[in-house]
Amino acid sequence: MKKRLVVFASGNGSNLQALIDACAQQRLHAEVALVITNRRTAYAAERAAQAGIPHRYEPLRPWLQNGKERADYDAYLAEIVAEQQPHAIVLAGWMHVFADLFIERFYGRILNVHPALLPAFPGAHAISDALAYGVKVTGVTVMYIWPGGLLSYDNGPIILQEVVPVYDDDDEDTLAARIHGVEHRLLPEAVRLHIEEKLEVHGRHVRLRP
């Protein structure tokens, strides 16, 4: 039986596409059961439609405009996710920080991808920050999400990392292109290891099962 994935995305959805392709090519014995976006312009919704995957557009703003709290929105999303009974929840360019109530409900099943070698360059501007700092290498990190607010997204146990070189003539676009290419390989592989139960978490350390 294929494992079920719920994918959250806010933008182009290229990492979503990498997961869809990995499933179609049977490199990942899973199916994307649901895609959730929070921006009307997110091309991830079109990618889901093209693949015949159910999609929900669930923006935060209407909740805030109606006097609700961010936690109310997150609790609502948690109910939607729970209905899918997912084996993994993948944040593929999801620009929203979940409240701890969401993370705790699905603890150990939420994976995130970040365009840097954490703990270097956390946050939303990792690629431009790396260029500004003048590093010679950056990379990609796939990790589990821990409770703990904003820092939880870039502070969970690391599943996989890979180095990406930074060249003297790089700008944000050229560096981002190389980073995204690595993300598209690393994220499906991390999801595969997770759903095949090949990972053990010991504190901050994630190890392959013997």
Image: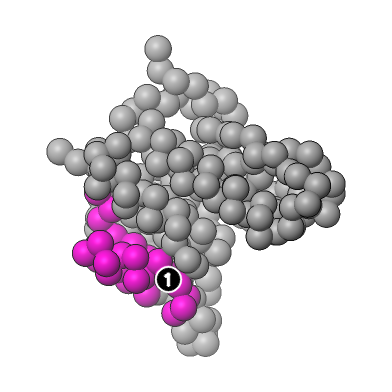
Disc count in the image? 1
Percent from the top left, x then y, of residue 185? 46, 40
Q: Which residue occupies 37% across, 60% down? A: 78
Res. 59 image quadrant: bottom left
Q: Which residue occupies 42% across, 71% down? A: 43
Please state if 149 lies on the left or on the right of 77 as rendered.
right
- Check if residue 127 falls in the magenta segment: no
Q: Which residue occupies 60% across, 48% down? A: 178
- Check if residue 43 falls in the magenta segment: yes
- The foreground one among 141 and 63 is 141
Secondary structure beneath label 1:
loop
- The foreground one among 52 and 102 is 52
Amino acid type, mark 1: Tyr
- The foreground one among 175 and 41 is 175
- Magenta stretch in the rendered image: 31-57
The outermost residue toward the front is 169
Percent from the top left, x then y, of residue 55? 30, 68
Q: Residues within 10 Å of mark 1 (few under 14, many from 20)?
A: some
Q: Which residue is mark 1?
A: 43
Percent from the top left, x then y, of residue 163? 64, 35
Q: Quadrant of the N terminus?
A: top left
- The foreground one among 167 and 83 is 167
Q: Is residue 145 visible?
A: no
The outermost residue toward the left is 1
Percent from the top left, x then y, of residue 44? 40, 66
Q: Which residue occupies 70% across, 59% down? A: 172
